[in-house]
Amino acid sequence: MSKWFCLKKKSKKRAKAKNTDTITTTSITPSCSNDTEKLNLTEERPKICADEINTFSFEEKPINIKVKDSNTISTSIPSSFASDLEKLNLTEERLKRYADEADTLYSDTTITSNTENELKTKVTFLREKAISKTLNNIKLSMKVDLCFVLDCTGSMGPFIAAARDCILQVTNFIKHTNPSIELRVGFCGYRDHTDGEGRLLTLDFTDQYGQFTTYLQSVPASGGGDAPEDVLGGLNAAITKMDWKNVTRVLLHIGDYPPHGKNFTDLADSYPKGDPHGLTAENVLEKLQSKNILYFFGKITDATEKMLQIFRGIIGEFPVFDLIGGDPIKLIEKFIKATSTSITYAVSMTSTIGSDSKDMYSLQRKKLDMNPNEPDWIILPLQEGIVMWYPILDTLNELKDPNYFNKSNLFSRSFSFKIASQPFSAGAERYAYFALDMERCPEKKMVIKEYLHVGRSDSFEKYIEAIEISTIASFLSTEFNLIAKGKNLPKVKFLNVKLLRCGTIDFSTRYYTIEPKLHNMEYKRFNANTGVITELRPILEAFVHFTYEYTKGYLVVCDLQGIELTNEFLLTDPAIHCIDSLRFGRTNFGKKGINQLFLANHRCNDICKQLKLKHINNGLSEVVV
Ligand SMILES: [Zn+2]
């Protein structure tokens, strides 16, 4: 029997949708020979409607498919798509990619298996080895050296006091949110060339936090002379004189004035040619990079803007914390936040990307090439493509069945859109572009994402996996919101993500994921798939716990990121740890990941209790917030 594709019209009234307009949805089944064998869209309909009434969905307006006559539909779906889909052997492609990804770690292993089962066994072995290695790296990245580099001249008294007083609260906070993190703290103070012996002072790293506090009590805010200070001398001493040993290295620099030199400032300067010892931003920051130290800055005045610009030109983007103004209590709060964020940010980065700062800084440099502004849509060409998605899941069995997510279960329809020529952001895995859904009136803003490295494998398969993860996370969040209903808790929602296939000018086929654009609010990462909690939100940690309990230990959804509204979270790009290591890509750390990153670190909170989730007994006390 020859394989062909069903493109079938659906014209029944929508059961739950917002309006009663006819929606035409295309279902693709690779082997159906007549109408009676085609997928029953009437049964699928309520699922799609549920999908559509999601606040962030695509289908609020009828889909633009041209109807030729009452029985057949012609869509702009090209025949090449049908043939690509028919050719795709999803299981084989996925196994090959997993082998590829694991192979970068074990290049001596060759995959020569013939049968699917043999391939599965070998790939499972490779994946497990890769996971063990990653978990070991994550463990190492939890060891942190944190050095405060602080301007100690005349006006800096309140800031020295805040650094001194914040450290115990920071270590307590870290102990409670991320019990796996081990921290050493150190200090490097700088003044100016006129300050003689008091120009540079250092306290090497220690885990005796009392020592740090006592030392800072003895540091006066004094000296300084002209406006610029010996910033480069301070940074250089911190980088070269301190005993950096731990894998994750954080340098938190706080100062109100820039280094000497005309390129840094127009203010009165005794050394307009720059540092008298020959230090430059370039040679100091190169040492910083070669020692895998991550740079963070606490801003007090606008006088350091030029310096930050020069630093960015050398090492790429880095986080800058606002420490401007406020009373001493507010200032300590800001210090606690800046310090804890630097630590969790750095740990999350080293545990995800690795401790080689070349990789970390190249990601930060990439961000400099981004265009953060929306393009002029009028001049951009209209493009045609096809979007694909899986229907909403109904049961846990469907979730656990890898075969449920096969190509015959994919829905698709044609789609017209515009996309910005440059990305506005880059993560460790993907670029993100502004886009417009042109099928809406008015057009709706979207975000299109593209993997940075697709490798040898068929990218189609990888994008299908991305929507599988998103479909599962959405299903679990809906179930979670149901049990949380009536308890006055914020909702946890995931954006509706679809797969987009389109052609390019050179006729090659490109794949992307596409999702609604989030409101213009601060995008936050709440936790990482490495178990690090970067912004503690009890409801989200309870959700992670729920996904473990609901699936009976089969998986946990993590890497929760997105925006926080008054009574809901809108999340995207989650990761899944699952006992089946042949699902959910390389961010799935398998059963070991569930045990070591979730079960060992999770502290049940009030919401876990309220929702009657079974207490996770790992010897850690409950979290107090
Ligand atoms: Zn819990």
Image (cartoon, helix red, strand yellow):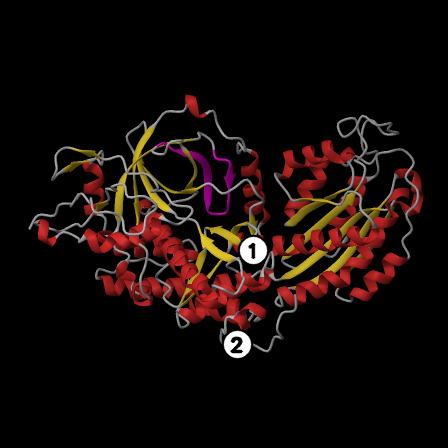
Q: Are marks 2 and 1 in contact (CB under 8 Å)?
A: no
- On the image, the x and y values in percent for residue 622 come to 61, 73
Residue 346 relative to residue 572: left or right = right
Q: Which residues are magenta?
A: 423-438
Q: Quadrant of the C terminus?
A: bottom right
Q: CA distance from mark 2 to mark 1?
A: 22 Å
Label 1: element kind: loop
Considering only vertical position in the picture, is 268 above or below 176? above
- On the image, the x and y values in percent for residue 611 come to 50, 70
- On the image, the x and y values in percent for residue 158 come to 86, 49
Residue 247 relative to residue 25: left or right = right
Three-letter code, disc 1: Phe
Label 2 CB less than 8 angstroms from ligand 1: yes
Task: Look at 50% across and 30% down and name the residue there.
Answer: 374
Task: Look at 24% across and 44% down and name the residue there.
Answer: 25
| Residue holding disc 2 | 615
- On the image, the x and y values in percent for residue 43 come to 21, 56
Three-letter code, disc 2: His
Give the quarter of the image for residue 119.
bottom left
| Residue holding disc 1 | 526
Labels 2 and 1: the sequence-earlier one: 1
Q: Does the segment drawn in magenta span residue 447?
A: no
Label 2: element kind: loop
| Label 2 Cα neighbours within 10 Å, binned few <14 / some 14-19 / many ≥20 | some
The chief SS type of the magenta part is: strand
Q: Does the segment drawn in magenta span residue 431?
A: yes
Residue 135 relative to residue 128: left or right = right
- Judge whether residue 588 can be spotted in this image: no
